[in-house]
Amino acid sequence: MTNIAKTIACVHCSKSFIIEVDEVRYKRWCDGLGFIQDELPELESWERELLLSATCDECWKEMFPPLPPTDEDEDE
Ligand SMILES: [Zn+2]
């Protein structure tokens, strides 16, 4: 098992992140032989997101903020 370090820059804020992945399984994913969550389950979800869409955790949260609480329960 060989780990390689991938440097990925977020397309939104240009910050660079280094993600270590297993070379063989990373290549399998690149070749479309497996889903990223199956090939690289040890990565944090934000790391997989970075590989998938080059969007870092911070920018992701900015684009998709948690839903604000609704007033629905208070309807009369
Ligand atoms: Zn970013």
Image: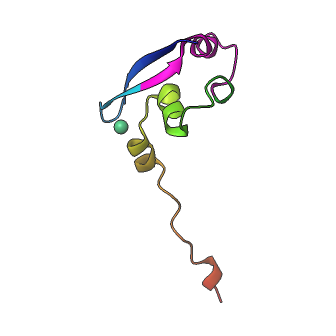
Give how far across and how far down residue 76 sits, in percent: 65, 90
Left or right: residue 32 compared with residue 46: right
Residue 15, by quadrant, is top left
Ligand 1: image quarter: top left
Give how far across and how far down residue 3 sits, in percent: 50, 16
Q: Does residue 30 show up magenta in the picture? A: yes
Give how far across and how far down residue 47 sits, in percent: 49, 33
* Residue at image coords 48%, 49%: 64
Looking at the picture, does residue 60 appear above or below residue 51? below
Give how far across and how far down residue 13 sits, in percent: 30, 36
* Residue at image coords 29%, 30%: 14
Between 68 and 32, the one lying in front of the other is 32
Q: How many marks?
A: 0
* Residue at image coords 62%, 15%: 25
The residue lying furthest to the left in this view is 14
The residue range painted magenta reads 19-36
Looking at the picture, does residue 70 appear above or below residue 51? below
Quadrant for the N terminus in the image? top right
Residue 74, by quadrant, is bottom right
* Residue at image coords 47%, 55%: 65
Question: Coloring scheme of the render?
Answer: rainbow
Left or right: residue 7 compared with residue 41: left
Q: Does residue 29 show up magenta in the picture? A: yes
Left or right: residue 55 compared with residue 45: left
